[in-house]
Every structure is written in C-alpha cells, then in structure tokens.
Amino acid sequence: MSSRVALRGSYRQHSLRATRIGRPQPQDRMEVTLVLRRKQAAPHPWAADRYHTHEELAENYGADPADIAAIEAIAAERHLSIASIDPAARTVSIVGSFSELASLFGADVELHRIESRTYRSRRGHLSIPQELTGRVSAVLGFDSRPVARSVKSFKPHNTDSVSYTPTQIAELYNFPKGSTGKGQTIALIELGGGYRNSDLKTYWKKLGLENVSVSSVAVSGAHNRATGNPDGPDGEVVLDVEVAGGVAPEAKIAVYFAPNTDQGFLKAINAAIHDRVRKPSIISISWGGAESNWTRQALDAFNQAFHDASLLGITVFAAAGDDGSSDGERDGQAHVDFPASSPWVVACGGTSLESIGGKITREAVWNDGSRGGATGGGVSAFFPIPDYQNNAGIPLSSSRPKFAGRGVPDIAGCADPMTGYFVLVDGTEGVVGGTSAVAPLWAGLTAIINSELGTRVGFLNPLLYGTFVEHKALNDVTQGTNGDFAAKPRWDGCTGMGSPNGQAILDVLKQIQQQQTKG
C-alpha cells in the first residue's frame, strides 16, 4: 500500500441545514472526476497575436500523458474502470463501487436530506496515493449536493410590472441594427429544467422572428426535461434561450444540460469549451453560488477551465447573483457569487431600467428592498485582483484577513423583475428578472459583434476597464446600492463599469481591428 497525502483544497463540511439519513451502500456504483495539472503554465490570452486552436491548447497546455498513465495504473490495480479521458480538459473519470473509490481517495461520505432531496455529503479532506501528488489537483464526484441556484422571479404577465421583449431591450441598449449573430454559436449551461420547442416556436413568432436554431446537449445523463413549473428551473432555461435567441436570432443556441453538482457543472463547462462540433464562441452561465460554499479545489478547477476558454477566444459571461451583497448567506458578511468571480469570466450585475419611447430615462442599481431581490456584487475572498482591475479602485474584501480581491461585477444590464423580460415558459406568459437575464443578453450582443467583425472578440475584460471607458461605450450607472456597496462613477460593486451601448462597443472594436490590420 503506497503512502497517502491530503489533497490540497479538498476540505469540505456538511451543511447544518441537512438531516443525516445514513451512508451510501458499499456496492453502489459511482463516478469520480480527477482534474490534472497542465503540462506547463498557460499564458495570458493577450500574450499571443492570435487565439489558440483546440489542438494547440491540448498539445501545449493539456494533461501530461505520464499523469494519465499513472492514474490508469492505479485504476487497474484497484480493478476500477476508466469512464473517460479528456487530455485537453485535463480530466479523467473513474467508475467503480463506492467502497473502492472512497477507500482510494479517503472520502468520508454520508447520505443527507434537505427538504425532499437526498444526496451524498462529504466532510474533511480527500487524500490521494503518493504517486499522484502534484499530478491531481481536484477530485470531484463524492459530494452530490447542489452547488448553484437558478432564477426565482417568474411573475404572470398580468401583474403591474413593466416588461420588455429582448428586441426592445436590444433597442434600448443601442445594439447594432440589422445584425443577427449569424455564424456564431452561443452555449448555455443549465443545471436542471428544460424548454418546450412548442413554446419557443410561439415565442419567436410573437417577436416577429423566424425559428431560432436551438439544440440540447446531454452531459452526464442530464437532458432537456421541462418540469411544467415556470417558477422553477424551467424559468431559468427558457429565459436564457429566449433572451439570447431574441437578440441574436441567427446565432445557433446550444443548451448543455448537466446535473447540479460541482462535478456535473464542470463537465458541462468543459463540454462547451472543448466542443469541436458546435464550436461555441460565447458561453452564458446563469447559475452560481456564494464562493464560501465551494471547495478551493473546485474553484481552482473551474477557473482553469475558464482560462482555457480565454485562450480559445471564447467569451464567458456569468450572472453575479440575485441576493445583494450577502449573496444569500446569513453570516452577516459580504459574499460574491461564483463562477462570476473567476477573473477569466465577465461578471454580470443588474439594473432597474425605465424608458419612454424606446429611450432610457433612468437606470439604477437593481434592489427590490422589501421584495427581496438585488444584484450581487462585491469583492472576492478567493481570487486576487487581476491586472485589468488594478486601476479600477476595487476596495479590500470584508473577509478576515482583508484581501485584495477581484471585483464583481464587470458590467451590468436590465435585471429588475419589475422592469423585466417578457417570456413564455411552460405555456405561460410571464415576466422574469434577475442577473440571470444579463448574461444571455451580453452573450447575444457578443454574437452580433463577432458576426460583424468576422472574428472572435474573446477575452473582453481588459477592454471593459480601458478602451470601452475611454470611448464611452458603456453607460455608467451611479444610483443605488446592493447592500454593502453603492453605485458611483466608473467601477462599483453593483453594476461594474456599466450597461452596454452596443453600437459604440462595435465601433470601438472595429477601430481596433483596423489598427491591427494596418499594423
């Protein structure tokens, strides 16, 4: 028996809200996913004169074959099966009995129940055989508790709230007229629920659009399964599809369905990033949870995947959360949402948007106060401040000890359910808000921009804090708070650098493209 070492960043605790109901059966079959180190450190995407191909990414920054071989040898010794190997995503999935896998990785696992859901809950550190030290950076799959929340603000259409269609929102934000996102694919990551094709067909017709191309991709056994409840995960899925498709109707929408676990979430993200068939140029994520609820190994594994996306020229947008500066936590502290807090992601905050005659009359921080919803945002307690935010005036985090962390969000858009988006979900017309709408909105805009430029804009974040500000391509939002943070000129922990002026953004990027061509 080889000696063992604790896996850095794997420590986990049980939820205090759960009820213990036993332990998994020793013979239960399960799958764990190992995340491996890179062959070599990956560069900043702007360090090269072009984005990488999938082949170059795998060859230069994928998994080392020797590391994969070491895992295969241990699996064979334990009579475990290799379910999949993805050198580009640096993952190996192993299948076996619970008892064998728990023994191999030192997993202390119980069965817990919250409300009506039963799941596996792990506590303590994992451990790995000595020969895997330095090779394996994360082991995911023992804990199956939900890691992300979905939209919760569906209101029937006959309420007193104001609603906009995606095409009306695009007009208010001056999206390039006549541009449709042709030739682009937008990936949507979904962790539950589903959509009905009949609803989408009716919706596109209401908007005066031809049928938008929407397809579903199954990940780890999850599928497009509409629940019939518009106020559940169906509302999230359909909001994403209808907003992205409504503003970029000739883009292809690929919806990746996965289980709501850290393992399933990462698999869906990797499936989209490394999809050589659909080749998404944009990924939109409307699911997330407070950083404090993630293990450090998971935060690192996801962040590395988003770094891969940036190297491939894939722009990733993620919602900043709908529970204000606490992000729904009850410890009296400020928290930010992940994956929005990843420095390789464009974090999307929310506003309340008022208009008359197709023109914005007022835009302020979304904060419903007594109604309970507000844009997320603040300062990461895990990810250090990235270079592109060095001059943005990000305050120290409120964590102990205080930390010079990445500021969230980067940008914003309409999110207030009282000035929300008209949708059709499970046969019911309604109004939905939340920062969940902002990620697909910006994803649709980026599809339009990519199509107009004839290339991928890719990693947008440095531009958001420099060139876009200089050319007034963003609408600075300076009114309102989300709890601990108040809106102010330039960056703030509610709306980032502001909401989009779509045509101005495209004009700036065209100027950059022309300068690069001349150079």
Image: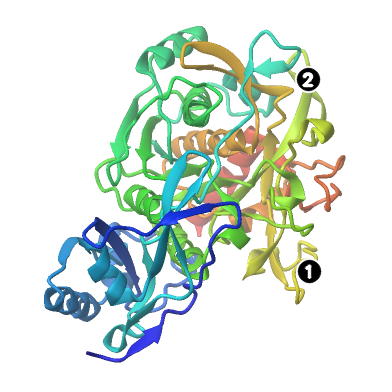
Looking at the rendering, in which quadrant would you find the N terminus?
Answer: bottom left
Which residue is labeled 2 in the image?
355
Badge 1: few (under 14), some or many (20 or more) residues near its Cα, within 10 Å? some
Which residue is labeled 1 in the image?
396
Residue drawn 79% across the image and 52% down it: 492
Badge 2: few (under 14), some or many (20 or more) residues near its Cα, within 10 Å? few
x, y percent for residue 460: 56, 52
User: Could you say whether the residue bearing mark 1 is in a helix, strand or loop?
Assistant: loop
Q: Is residue 474 left or right of residue 3?
A: right
Q: Is residue 494 visible?
A: no
In front: 194, or 127?
A: 127
Which circle, 1 or 2, is nearer the viewer?
A: 1
Tell me whether circle 1 and circle 2 mark residues in contact (CB < 8 Å): no
Q: Earlier in the sequence, mark 1 or mark 2?
A: 2
Residue drawn 83% across the image and 32% down it: 370
x, y percent for residue 6: 42, 83
What amino acid is labelled 2 in the image? Ser
In front: 258, or 353?
A: 258
Q: Is residue 256 left or right of residue 101?
A: right
